[in-house]
Image (cartoon, helix red, strand yellow):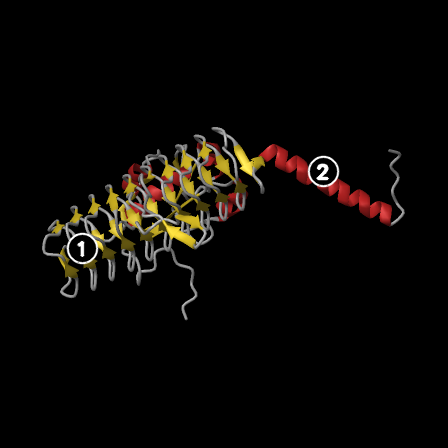
Amino acid sequence: MDRLEIAGDARFFRNSGPHTLAAVVDAALGEAPPRRLMLAGIAPLQLAGPDQVSFLDNRKYLPALAATQAGAVIVHPNQAAAVPAGAVAIVTTEPYAAWARVAALFFPPPPVNPGIHASAVIAADAEIDPSAEVGPFAVIGAGVRIGPRCRIAASVVIGDGCILGRDCRIGAHASISHALIGDRVFIYPGARLGQEGFGFAVTAEGFLSVPQLGRVVIGDDVEIGANSCVDRGSVRDTVIGAGSRLDNLVQIGHNVQIGRACVLVAQSGISGSTILEDFVMVGGQAGLTGHLKIGRRARIGAQAGIISDVPAGADYMGTPGEPSKAFFRGVATLRRLVRRGGQKANGTDTSTG
């Protein structure tokens, strides 16, 4: 097996290079001294060669920068002087964003291949733009509308009445129902959108399912990770705001309202009717109970259990969730008590109180 560490293995990714240094600098939205230099690809500092671009966005990698053989390095102005003489410094105040743009220059998304595979099952009244691609064994229901340049991968199921905007990418085996989806939405393999929410009434005879009559509404430029689930609303819509990112294995309950540019990390779960305002970040495995309001730019730490509203701009951690400063004070106090208890047990306690 080939164990060589390669960025952009040609078996899986198409490299559009080489590109001139000027083209790379333009893509980075950066500045660099003019030089005749062709760059063939990207690589980390430790592996980059003279025809490759790398970047630095963390001071702990300064030793790797000093030793790099890269032809060009994207850096913050504060680190420009540390770039070796043999490399060109591409200077920008946002190195990681520049790196993303340069990587996309060399490795753009593969083009859509317009057309419908012969094995796909398409309802007679579905409207699929001629520039869209529909893969093998996809199932497209009645009244579905699919916009220009969408890619529908193999074995995707899109239920009756769903609407997809422009330039969407739906990964293999994903299923979508009861959904209105904006432009440039990426739904990764195995994701489930629009299934019934977890709603039931408790009666003397047992549980009585409550009809889930809402929809899922997805804004532009949203990404929903592999095997994530977004339940449709019960009597109102479940909404994911423009630009938000859901990692793999995220659960969104019915009627949840997620604002713009929120981030939810893997295995986090949001219970029904909770509201996340714009720019909220939720760490991995965090859980939020229902009917809460999480304020704008709040941050929820990994594995936190949130059972009450969180103010705008606050950082919460722990279970039950509390402001991060209070959480760390509690951890420090507990550790002091544990150490003191151990000292007393060993007969070494010298405290006078």
Disc sitting over residue 345 in the figure: none
Q: Residue at the spot x=56%, y=38% of the render?
A: 321
x and y percentages locating residue 308 in the rendered image:
52, 35
Residue tagged 2: 333
Question: Residue visible at 29% across and 48% down?
Answer: 186
Residue 249's x, y, as percent?
42, 53
- Residue 79 higher or lower than 248, as above or below: above
Image quadrant for the N terminus?
bottom left
Residue 159, given in percent of the width and then of the height, sits at 22, 53
Query: In the structure shown, which secondary structural element does the residue marked by tag 2 occupy?
Result: helix
- As rendered, which of 325 and 9 lies closer to the eye? 325
Indicate the amino acid at tag 2: Thr
Quarter residue 351 falls in:
top right
For marks 2 and 1, give the one nearer the viewer.
Answer: 1
Residue at 20%, 50% (x, y): give it. Answer: 150
Q: Farthest front residue?
A: 204
Residue 50, horizontal then vertical, whole percent: 38, 50
In the figure, 137 relative to 68: above or below? below
Q: Earlier in the sequence, mark 2 or mark 1?
A: 1
Lateral position of residue 87 relative to residue 336, left or right: left
Judge from the rendering whether residue 21 lies leftward or rightward of residue 198; answer left or right: left
Q: Residue furthest bottom?
A: 1
Mark 1 crowdedness (10 Å alpha carbons): few <14, some 14-19, many ≥20: many
> Does residue 249 sit above or below 73 in this rendering?
below
- Taking the spot 23% from the left edge, 41% from the top edge, the residue there is 183
176 over 154 or under it: above or below: above
Q: Residues within 10 Å of mark 2 (few under 14, many from 20)?
A: few
Write down the residue under mark 1: 141
